[in-house]
Image (spheres, grey):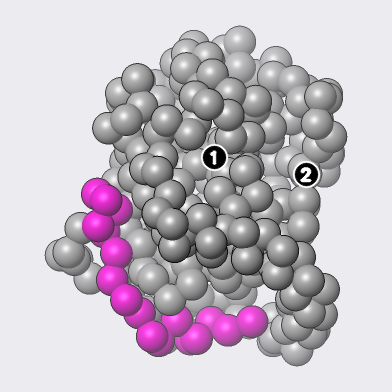
Amino acid sequence: MQTILDLTDRFPLRFDVERMKDDLRRLEDGEWLAHYDKQISNGWTAIPLVSQDGSLAGPDAQRLGTCGRYKRTPVVDRLPYFRAILDAFDCPQGRVRISRLLPHSIIRPHRDICGEAASVVFDQVRLHIPIITNHQVVFIVGRQSLRLRPGRLYYIDFTKRHWVLNDGNEPRVHLILDLTLNDFLRELFPPLTRTEQLQKAVLRWTLPVVWPLFRVTFALSQHLMPAQSLNPRGAEVARPLDTAEGVNSGEIRQDHSSRAIES
């Protein structure tokens, strides 16, 4: 199954980065919520646009919610271009966030599993639209190093192990949308080959079986990893090439040194 797909050219709306940045300027610093799991990141914040019951405060504003209880938050009324983007996705919408990773911050290695599983395998996806990024961002999914371009719409399989390091001097800001596959969304994806259809059937059954093991190994890594590993300065990390061969407009290269920050 594909790790990353660029869906931009099949989407009916073109994403205007400058208009998204204009909306971002309407937000106050105090509105950004720190991620509820401090063990995963030391500088990951978000503005919820769609959340459980439309909440803007507390952990529930960022956590996975209950189907049927997702609502747009009041902040959407102040962000006209983001509201237009939400309107353009004619599919069931779950959690939607403007995600900000601060300079010299990291999201530690993890997998999105169980209810958080984001993959076409489970008919629920997590799409990214980069808004602000820089060449010092390291984004590893599986063993692929990704460089995402602002204003593009990406599908990424987050059931695979992934981590992010922003070693630049400006925040990394993405719009992240949790969506349920329907006919509208399926039209954005290339048809599955017979091999991929078989892989999907196998993974849909096998992945939930091994998820408890992933939980145990992740808990152990959180306990054993020294606190200073949350500070990326001086860490030897895999850096994406400044000029890499583009794959689906998301620059990707195979990377076998992604264990520099290991879970």
Bounds of the magenta segment:
247-263
Residue matched to label 2: 63
Q: CA distance from mark 1 to mark 2?
A: 13 Å
* Residue 151 image-quadrant placement: top left
SS category of the residue bearing label 2: loop
Upstream in the sequence, badge 1 or badge 2?
2
Residue type pointed to by label 1: Ile
Residue matched to label 1: 176
Q: Residues within 10 Å of mark 2 (few under 14, many from 20)?
A: some
Q: Is residue 209 above or below residue 17?
A: below
Q: Quadrant of the C terminus?
A: bottom right
Residue at image point 48% right, 34% down: 186
Q: Are marks 1 and 2 in contact (CB under 8 Å)?
A: no
Residue type pointed to by label 2: Arg
Q: Nearer the viewer, residue 7 or 86?
A: 7
Locate residue 122, reporting x and y percent. 65, 50
Q: Nearer the viewer, residue 216 or 106?
A: 216
